[in-house]
Amino acid sequence: MQINPLTRDTSIEPLPSPYLLFLGDATEPGFAKTAFGLRDWAPERCLGEWSTNAATVTTGLPRLTPKEARMRGARGLVIGVASIGGAIGASWIPHLVEALEAGLDLVSGMHHRLTDVPQLAAAAERCGRKLVDVRVPPPNIPIACGRKRSGKRLLTVGTDCALGKKYTALAIAKAFTAKGVDADFRATGQTGILIAGSGMPMDAVISDFGAGAAEMLSPDAAPTHWDVVEGQGSLFHPAYAGVSLGLLHGSQPDVIVVCHEAGRTEMMGYPSYPLPSIEDTISLNLRLGARTNAAIRCAGVSANTSRLDEAAAREWLARESARLGMPVADPIRGGEEFEKLVAACLS
C-alpha cells in the first residue's frame, strides 16, 4: 500500500494508529528523528517504543513488545529511524516480522520500500497485515516553470541535517495560526508527512523534478496566506545539497529561517566536513534563492540548544542575536526570543 502524500481527501484510509515506534539499532538521536518527531507532535498516537538490543536511543516512551503494544490498542508499528540512504536494516527484519505476526501493520518512510522486502511481503500476506510506504512521490510531477505564485512562503533552511528544520516549521506555523494568520505547514520529509497526513517526500523525487515538486507543494494561494515549508538537508551538505537547492528554487520563499544546532561543529555522519557558519548559510541561501524570488530575506535563526542547560541556552541565544543583528530563538524553549523571531517572519 502506498499513500499519495499530496492528497487531503478525508476519504483516504488513515494510517493505522496508535503507533508503536521502532528505533531499529539507532545509537545517535539524530537518526531517530522520525520517532522523536511523532512523540513531540503527535503524542496522542504514540503508545510506546521498541528496538533491537543494539539500540541506545530512547524516546522515553514505555518499552513494549509488539504483542504488548497490540494488547494496549496499537494498530501500527512505525519505523522511527531516518538512516543514511533510507535502507531497512537486515537486523530489523525479524523484529518487523514479529510485529506483523503480533497483529500490527507496518508504516515506513524509508527509501527502501516495505513492499520490496520479500520476507515482509510474505509475512504481511500470511498474517493479513498491511505494509504502508509514505515516501512515495505522486505521479506526473511537472518540471518547474519558475512562475511567481500568489501567497506567501517561508522555508526553513539549515547548516546541516537533523537539527530542527521540521520542528521550526511546525512551531512557526502553529504560532502564525495562534496570531490569526492563515497558515499551513507543508511537509517535505517522511516524519512531517506522518505528522501532517500529507506532503511531498522531496528526497524521493527524481532530481529533474525537484523544483517542480516544490511548486506543486505550495501552489497559488490567497495574498495573505502563508505556506510554512519544512526544509531538507543543507546547501553545504556533501550528499543532500541537490535536494535543498531544488526545494529552495521551487518553493520561492519570501522568508527563510536558518536552523542550527548550538555546539555542532561537523556534518552529522560526515566528520571530515566542518559545519558552515550561520553567516555563510544565510548568504548562500539568499544568493541562490534570489534566482526565483528576488525579494527573499532572512528573518532570523532557529537554534537547537538541547545540549545546553536553560541558563547557558539563553546566554547563547542572546549572544548570537547580538552578533548577527537578528532574532535567534529556540522554538522548543519558546519565550521572548521566539516571539521576536515570529514577528520578524511576519514583518
Image: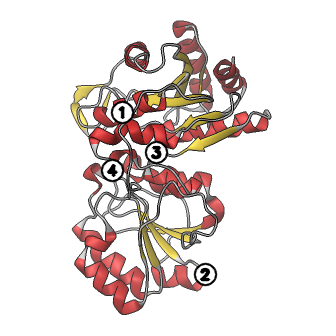
Which element is circle 3 on?
loop
Q: Mark 4: which secondary structure?
A: helix
The label on residue 72 is 2
Hey, which quadrant is residue 263 in on the image? Answer: top left
Residue at x-position 40% and y-position 62% = 23
* Secondary structure under the numbered disc 1 in the rendered image: helix
Camera sees residue 162: no
Classify residue 114 as left or right of residue 195.
Answer: left
Give amino acid for label 1: Gly
Using the rendered image of the protein, determine whether residue 270 is visible from the camera's viewpoint: yes
Marked residue nearer the N-terminal end (1 or 3):
3
Q: What is the x, y in percent for residue 244?
A: 36, 33
Tag 1 residue: 246
Residue 177, x across and y down, in percent:
74, 38
Chain-order first, disc 2 or disc 3 = 2
- The residues tagged by marks 2 and 3 sit, at their Cα atoms, a distance apart of 32 Å
Figure check: 315 above or below 75: above
Q: Nearer the viewer, residue 51 or 160?
A: 160
Which class describes the residues within 10 Å of circle 1: few (<14), some (14-19), or many (20+)? many
